[in-house]
Image: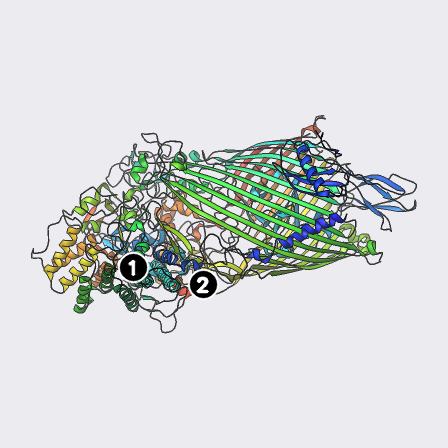
Amino acid sequence: MKKVYILLISLIASGTFISCEDQLDVENPNEPGLTSAQTESGVISLAQGAVYVNGFRDLKYYDGIPGYFWSGAVGFHELMGDVIGEEAANVFGNQIGAPDYIVLDNGTQVLNPNAPNKQKELIKQINLNSNAGSNTLFYEWAYMYSLNNSCNTVLETVEHVSFTGDAEAKKNTIKAWAYFWKGYAYSRIGSMYIAGLINDVSATTNANYVTKEQVIAEASSNFDEAAALLSGLAGNAGYTSTINSLIPAFNQIGHGGALSSDMWIRNINTMKARNILVNTTVQNMTAAQWQEVLELTNNGIKATDYVFTGRANESGDLLSASAGTVSAKTTGNPGQGTTYKISERLIQDFKPGDQRFANNFNQLANPWRGESSRGNAFNTRFELVDGGNGLDGVIILGSKTPGEYELFLAGSYEENELMKAEANIYLGNLEEGLKLIDAVRAYQGAGLAPVAATGLSMEAALEELRRERRIGLLFRGLSFYDARRWGVINDVSQGGGRTGAVVVSSAGQVNTNATINYNFAPYWDVPDNELVYNAPAAGSAPVKVDL
Amino acid sequence: MFRNYSINLNYSTIFINYSVVSVNCCFYFNKICYLIVNFIYYPIFVKISLPKPNSNYNKTKTNMMKNVLFSLLCVLMFISPTFAQQGKTITGTVTDQATGQGLPGVTVVVKGTSVGASTEVNGKYTINAPSDGATLVFSFIGYSNIERAIGGATTINVAMGVDAKQLGEVVITGVGVATDKRKVAISVESVSAKDLPQAPSASIDQALIGKIPGAQITSTSGSPGADVNILLRGINTINRGTGPMILVDGVQMGATNLSTIDLSTIDRVEVIQGAAAATIYGAQGANGVIQLFTKKGQRGKINVDFSSSVSANTYINEGGVRKAQYHAFATDANNNVIGTSGQPLVLDPATLTYSENVIYNPLDVTSQLNKAYDANLQYYDHYKSFFQTANTFNNSVGISGGGEKVDFAVTVSNNKQESNIRNNGNVSRTNLTSNVGIDLYKGLTLRSITQLAYTKNTIKFEDRDIMFSLNNARPFANFEQKDTDGDYGLYFGDAIGVNHWNPLYYGQYLNQDENKIDVIQNFNLNYKFPKFLEFDVRYGVNYQRREREFLIGNQINNNNATETQGWYSEYNSGAPTGEIINYSYNNVFQNFLPKATFITDFQEDFGLSVPLRTTTQVGFDWRSQTRSEYFTAGLGLPDFTPVTAAQASTYRILTDYTEPFVTYGYLVTQRFDYSDFVGISGGFRSDYSSAFGQGSKPFTFPRGDAYFRLSGLNFWETSKMGTIMPELKFRAAYGQAGIQPQPFDRYPTLSTRSLGSSTGFYLPSTQSNPDLSVEVSEEIEVGADMVFSLLKNTSWLNDVTLSATYWDRSTNNSIYNVDVAPSTGIGKLKNNAFSIGSHGFQASLTAALFNNNNFNWNFTTNFGKQTSMITSTSGQEIVVLSSAGSTNYVLRAGEKIGQLYGYISLHDVTARMPNGEYFIPEAQQEDYEVASNGYVVNKATKQPYFSANMYSFGDPNPDFNMSFVNDFTFKNFLNFSFQFDWVHGSHLYNQTKEWMYRDGIHSDYEKPITINGETGAWTAFYRGVYAQRQANGTKDYFYEDASFVRLRNVSLGIELNKIIDLPAFRKLQLVFTGRNLLTFTDYTGMDPEVSSGTNNSAFDRGTDHNTMPNYKAYQIGLNIGL
């Protein structure tokens, strides 16, 4: 019998053997720990993921109709810039760009059919924490602060890394990368929201909201920090290998590539010029500001420079080929399920004979007509062609083939030249400005007759510039900024709106002399999701726009 | 066969046709060698008598092992040692009065002495009697004691009857020691197999619906193999849902779903619902425990049972959901629906697309839904085309029985259930269950319980996705039409509605094949010392492997895909070239539970006059789980068939994930029972876990309970009260139990993402928290149990049992991913974020309403009422998202869990907001009126008014739920029973309807309304309901009362062998069963019982978003017993 006891006791005792406390120290075997980033390859991985994943992909809220940053958050800009229209109501996509009213050729006023029927009321009504992922105002803020935080983490981590070879150069390259993207994040925040936060420590925040102007100043100071680090790196092998690792191979095509430190500095100058241009209305731009834009763009991106681009690969690591960009979500027959529909107002901004139109747009047999209870301006007769119509040397504006469409993440040569052109025109160098417009058109294969030396008036030159910014910078996230600084989004009573507009009515009739009163909010309130969990401290700048 | 071996073998008659794979362990004592031999399907315990080993013990053992192994390839042996009895003896047999069969385990004691014995398997006993003048006392739990004077007899046979006064039976769950229910101080519900209906799904979870008082068990989807939602007592956690712990014969089943368990193998189910009862389960007990007991074989006879049934299942559409038969599109003079070209819409037969959209101005105040589909467009009844009557087949064979020292039960069964969606596959589940018990030695028993389940699932596409596709298609789509190449189209153009897809396209290009194997193996070794002490060791391993292959064919040649640039893909976003995705899941759960129980009886054991009994339990509990997932995708397939992932142009490993988890703890409880009328117990459980914050700190959960049994007092039995109420007990219990954080909740890590040829690290938007605590739930329950015998000496109301329990509980540190200000760069942080409180009341009444030789009528009603609310949060409100759609929930202190927030409609133009202001400013009120359907509408636009702010709609959870079961038996051969379930006060957000309002698809659009004196089917009103304030926003218009009464089960059984003399049959029963045949509800969706939230979600329980409704089933079955 004793053996029975021995058996039972040993069985029970075995319990104590199998359960020592070491067992409890279960690590997560699936994902790298935070210290994994503290190696040379680790910090490069972190710096890559910081931008391409934290910056543009991974947020707590997601809705597949707008999609991630480059189709969703940027899509809201393009909707408000009247480059595209949308029928789907996800994240209020159909409402964020719906004008207050349209007066058709016959004088009929078509109100925004939604409720509320004014965009300014809408953005106040939907900015609620409980709206979670349905709050249109949430996304750009959250993506950009996610980018800022991950860059802060990179800056903190890189101090713990021992590099091989030219350690200082490699470290400075990574730091420049982080400061550049922090500058980029602040640029977007300061260009969209009434106030922001300056935050240089990872995973934490403060409640001292500052004005959008202060946020833009912070963007500049980060850009300057990056430029200062880069200025000593020209031709450095450590720099070259690091930048080559930071930019994913699938982006190193076309205008994308491992830019030299000089190219990068020029990219920075273009971004700094953008920050001045897009945040001041044309009426309020001073000669000094135009001069500053001119100087920056003179030292900005050149035609042969690499810039920051994004491409889709088959598995959609950064961008999905069929849905990852505003362009992809616009490409195809608007009646066959494309999220975004090309705007008639964009089409009317093409000059006759523009090969970019011929290469990229087809007219439908019958207009696509969205449901009239969802919008008043989104009907269209055109479709953006997938992969272009095959015209040689002409830019392709839409493609769902992996890798074919080139997305510009920050500045581009065309943007730099058009800012330079605009500065020149406003500073009185009309012809110089027009030449630059011609250069951009030639660069994109527009096939248009030059406008330089044709004796255009200032007004006509500005119209050429307006059209070219609309067409030449299509889908680069600038259309709303332009509409704002040109006053297009203002109420008709304040000189805003658009006259002579092409509008396809809900019955399918084409109006060519319609008036559109957009009346959009120029800047957005700080999202409520931020305010609920980080209430403004005393002395903060106003966090809500007075509309 | 044993030619070379000089071992003395006796073997019994069981022949096992499996090959031996290995010998797991071997031990030797008392002339007997014990082997655990692992056969292909399950291990079996074998013992062999040997000569006493010599000094060269190891060598002998090794030789013996080799030899025996060889010998055992085919034959299994059991040898029974004999035990000599000495002295003057009395022998006899104790039988069950009802069945006449021997009762094992009956205690036989010489009255007033400590001399005792217990009956063997066949009911036989032998006892030494000191004198003829003594009396023998026979006692057995659940039966009335019998005393017999010995007199001159040497043989005393007794037949024991069931104690009429008992509350039922013996329970184990929550108590740890088999305890007479009359002396249990906690609320334990138990249901035996005979009371479980033969649900067509043949799964235990479906059968439990309505059977457990207090529990909310709901069948939330009619998809084959769908799990039920289980909410026992209150919502205690948000992080881990409401699912209780499932035990099978004392061991946790941590990897297998309850719906996998074959109903026919379950003997009994016990349920404890709250922390007060579940403290002995420690850090995993807070959601309550459902314990299943597997059927055992009856020793002494062999039974063979066959059962077979087939059912026809039709989907329920109680609300009469259908699509509008009329439309409001622009038409020409011939009623052709036209596009903007002015020409009638035409479907291109080559591409299956409409070239133009319809012209539809739903907000136009003159637009009415009153045009027939009688010209170029036709009305198709999509439900008729896509739903079918599905069949379910059930077959099972069971053999059970046993010898003197062994009992066994083996059942093989198969359940096959088709989808109610046409051509959408089926789920087939095959179970093999065995339960073998062996008496190894006097007092030492070994039991091995094995359940193997193989489930094959060929459901092509989620029923819910198909429902969504269909419900968002305008009815003029002819999905059956094939293009000129013979292919189906996916998307017919915006004219059909932008959210439609053709399920037949999925049918053409998708194939799913899922194979799942579940193994649940429990071993239990139990040794009862003659007195005081019992050792019990249990070890269980539960293994699940699930392999799912999802094949999306190459669609490049599909004209519709080419035309619309739309195709089906999961990961291949670049081209319609298809993909093969393999999902592999592994889950291994182990549970090891040694336990010692020490029981004393002061009178019997120590001869003291104090009628005190003590029970001490010390236990240890170790659990370990390893889950892993490995997903791969082969993108870009060739267009020939068959294809394999090897032919894909890109191959990608999508997921490679392993999740280890370990927890262990120990338990100490002490219980005292004084006489038959009072008992008290207390103790604690202390647990360690790999998931707790800071790793090694244990959490300790205390408990205590007490009962006072008035009917156990001497005066009671003879009093008048005692005759009317033979049983009355009051009880109270307090306890804490926990809910563990998820395994990695406390480990901050980086995430990785492929970026082409490199890998990026990124910071996950939800951050882990190293400081997390276990969620601790604390509960007090008080209750009473009573039995009435109302009309003595008649056939009426002789046994009426009422049990009632009130409970109150709170969870103080519930974990949730709480929003963090986005400027930190973090999305959410896991935190012990808020406190939840809940309370409720449950009761059950069972009554033998009428009982005589020819006719029995038993009635049971169960009642449960509970409510849960957030008592505090760590800071600001917590916003949670429903998986069901665009419906948000908000968790705020002082509010009920699971409330929906949204815009409210008005029924009075002068209604005021909570702050006293008018919803509609006074100056604008003249623009509004109450329309004929009761909603406040704008007279000019005909659109309804919705509030500018969002308000709570209230608690969607039911006010109470009840069930009523009637069971009639006539002359032993006819049985008729039915069960009604009543869920009252539950609400559903009819998201399905809201989506159908989007494109004017729902039949409500046909209903005329009078607005401003004009009557018509105004589309502006219905469209306004959808679009006002927020398109597809959450509106009280769609928040509906989903109370229902359902005829859950009706069954008629005829035992043919009792009508006709068929001696070959022990049982020959024909059973007609109906399930869900009748539903009474005001809910306008298909089925008020569904929920689209995640299974067992704590908060997401109130939305119906295109969920597959339950089905009505008509089943015929044949049960044969030999």
Relative side of A364 to B640, left or right: left
- Between B354 and A416, the one nearer to me in the picture: A416
Q: Which of marks 2 and 1 is in front?
A: 1
Query: Residue B404's x, y, as percent?
Result: 76, 37
* Above or below A140: residue B121: above
> Would you say B502 lies left or right of B542 here?
left
Q: Do labels 2 and 1 share a chain?
A: no
Q: In this view, does A537 lie above or below A191?
A: below
Residue B699 at x, y percent in the picture:
60, 61
- Amino acid type shown at disc 1: Tyr
| Disc 2, SS | loop
Q: Mark 2 points at which residue?
A: B914
Q: How many marks?
A: 2
Q: In which quarter of the image is the N terminus of chain B?
A: top right
Q: Disc 2 and disc 1: Cα gap in Å? A: 64 Å
Mark 2 — on which chain does it sit?
A: B
- What is the secondary structure assignment of the residue under circle 1? helix
Who is closer to the viewer here, B752 or A532?
Answer: B752
Q: Which of B332 and B98 is in front in this view?
A: B98
Q: Dividing the picture into quarters, in which one does residue B553 lie?
A: top left
> Which corner quadrant holds the C terminus of chain B?
top right
| Chain containing the residue with disc 1 | A
Report which quarter residue A314 is drawn in: top left
For mark 2, does the 10 Å Cα neighbourhood hold few (<14), some (14 to 19), or many (20 or more) residues?
Answer: few
Image coordinates of residue A259 in percent, x first then y, are 26, 56
Q: Which mark is residue A456?
A: none
Kind of residue at disc 2: Pro
Whether label 2 touches label 1, CB < 8 Å: no
Instruction: Note whether residue B187 is visible.
Output: no
- Nearest to the observer: residue B588 or residue B1115: B588
Residue lying at 29% horizontally and 32% vertically, measured from the top left: B350
User: What is the number of the mark on residue A239?
Assistant: 1
